[in-house]
Amino acid sequence: MKVIIGSDVKGFKLKEHLIKFLNSKDYKVVDVSPDPNLNFVESAKLVSEEVLKEEDNFGIVIDEYGAGSFMVANKIKGIICAEVSDEHSAHMTKEHNNTKIISLGSGIIGKTLAENIVMNFLNNEYSGGRHQIRIDMLNRLA
């Protein structure tokens, strides 16, 4: 599993923190936005495109409120992204929605909560079954 991560200028510090955190947990992390001056459209597009390259890639996009990156990622065919600000939502969106990317708002959540959200997202599996009907519907929209 690779974790693809990117941010705009407002999410840059949280992104850097999460990269160190994920590296300490032995995750392979790819930072697609090492330039802190990217806007959320550019960074979310880069993360989305990289996530699509391999089946076991997952992504994290970060801006000030999470909403902008969320909207951009969901415009990319094949991506399901959820804007997440709590651990339970991170768990459930992966389990029920087969989410490939989560969007975080650096102005909403702190470092510890971000760590917990990311771990709940990465350490859960898609349960399939009845949920696949909605996934298929979502994928037909894009």
Image (cartoon, rainbow, N blue to C red):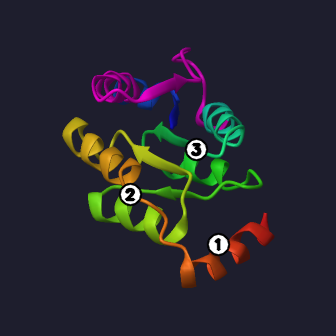
Task: Decide if residue 56 is on the left or right side of residue 64.
Answer: right
Answer few, some or many: residues within 10 Å of disc 2's Cα (few below 14, many 20 plus, some between 14 and 19): some
Label 3 element class: loop
Q: Looking at the picture, how far across and down is residue 72, in whole percent?
A: 66, 48
Q: Which mark is first along the chain, 2 or 1? A: 2
Mark 3–mark 1 Cα distance, whole angstroms, equals: 17 Å
Label 1 element class: helix
Whether residue 91 can be seen here: yes
Q: Is residue 112 magenta?
A: no
Magenta span covers which residues? 15-41
Q: Which residue is mark 1?
A: 135
Residue closer to the observer: 55 or 136: 55
Q: Is residue 35 magenta?
A: yes
Count of marks placed on residues: 3
Whether residue 65 can be seen here: no
Answer few, some or many: residues within 10 Å of disc 1's Cα (few below 14, many 20 plus, some between 14 and 19): some
Residue type at the position of mark 2: Asn
Mark 2–mark 3 Cα distance, whole angstroms, equals: 13 Å
Q: Which mark is first along the chain, 3 or 2? A: 3
Q: Which mark is first along the chain, 1 or 3? A: 3
Q: Which mark is residue 124?
A: 2
Task: Decide if residue 34 is on the left or right side of residue 25.
Answer: right
Q: Which residue is mark 3?
A: 56
Q: Which mark is residue 82?
A: none
Residue type at the position of mark 3: Asp
Q: Looking at the picture, how far across and down is residue 18, in whole percent?
A: 34, 30
Label 2 element class: loop
Residue type at the position of mark 1: Ile
In the picture as drawn, the residue positioned furthest to the top comes out as 35
